[in-house]
């Protein structure tokens, strides 16, 4: 079986890719994740997914490499990972009662093939949240390393009114439906 590498050290992405029951390695791509002036959240997510896959594919040209990135979008502007309790409280406060779109891009690279990409948009309808609810949630799950300051696979699901998506894994960080399709297109044989 050819080597498969996830260009990420995200535990969330590793857990998702493991669902495909394929052996894979992980590698940390060093990529500047700063948005470019005027760059849309969807374009930012795709650029970063490709950049992450490119970095590792240059080191491992015979491998199939998967890169992915997710950008939360509120009112057309990107939201990064909160990084701190105060950041998470502020993000969730800003999203309370609002609609937030999560752009999750994936890229598969193999050899000299052009990068194969897909971007999923998941729309999350947040319910109106009291500040005490937000504090309880942040203190319970510590979502400081998550785009949007929540973990939908955990207690974070209680923050929502609804989720609209074509791939429920995308919100966690890796759209598996698109990932499997891109791997097949690149010539990787799935079981």
Image (spheres, rainbow, N blue to C red):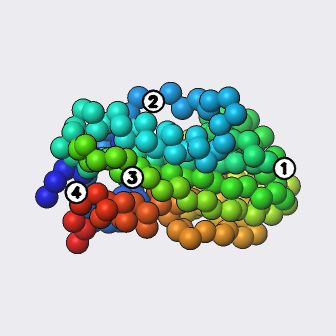
Q: Is residue 79 visible?
A: no
Left or right of 92: which side holds 6? left
Residue 133 pos. (x, y %)? 79, 55
Q: CA distance from mark 2 to mark 4?
A: 25 Å
Real-space CA distance between mark 2 and mark 1, rounded to the nearest whole angstrom: 35 Å
Q: Identify the residue shown where x is 66% and y is 42%.
A: 40
Q: Secondary structure at mark 1?
A: helix
Residue wearing tag 4: 23
Mark 1 closeness class: few <14, some 14–19, many ≥20 residues within 10 Å: some
Is disc 4 in contact with disc 3, using a CB cutoff of under 8 Å? no
Residue 112 in percent (x, y) is at 25, 43
Q: Is residue 144 above or below residue 102?
A: above
Q: Residue at x 47, y 60 (%)?
A: 175
Sequence-earlier tag: 4 or 1? 4
Q: Residues within 10 Å of mark 4 (few under 14, many from 20)?
A: few
Q: Position of residue 69 (x, y in %)?
A: 50, 45
Q: Residue at x 41, y 49 (%)?
A: 107
Callouts 4 and 1 close, C-beta under 8 Å: no
Horizontally, residue 147 falls left or right of residue 77, namely: left
Residue ID for mark 1 = 131
Between marks 2 and 4 in the image, the one whose residue lies nearer the viewer: 2
Q: Which residue is mark 2?
A: 31
How far apart are the alpha carbons under marks 4 and 1? 43 Å
What residue sits right under mark 3 in the picture?
116
The Cα atoms of the two marked residues, 3 and 2, are separated by 19 Å
């Amino acid at each position: 079986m050819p080597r498969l590498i996830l260009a990420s050290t995200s535990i969330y992405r590793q857990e998702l890719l493991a669902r495909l029951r394929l052996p894979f390695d992980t590698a940390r791509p060093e990529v500047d994740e700063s948005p470019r002036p005027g760059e849309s959240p969807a374009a930012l997510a795709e650029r970063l997914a490709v950049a992450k896959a490119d970095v590792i594919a240059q080191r491992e040209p015979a491998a199939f490499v998967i890169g992915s990135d997710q950008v939360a979008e509120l009112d057309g502007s990107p939201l990064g990972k909160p990084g701190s309790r105060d950041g998470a409280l502020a993000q969730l406060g800003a999203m309370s009662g609002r609609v937030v779109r999560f752009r999750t891009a994936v890229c598969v690279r193999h050899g000299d093939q052009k990068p194969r990409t897909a971007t999923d948009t998941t729309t999350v309808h947040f319910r109106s949240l009291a500040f005490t609810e937000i504090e309880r949630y942040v203190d319970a799950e510590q979502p400081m390393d998550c785009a949007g300051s929540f973990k939908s696979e955990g207690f974070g699901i209680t923050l929502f009114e609804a989720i609209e998506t074509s791939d429920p894994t995308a919100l966690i960080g890796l759209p598996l439906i698109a990932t499997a399709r891109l791997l097949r297109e690149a010539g990787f044989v799935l079981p």
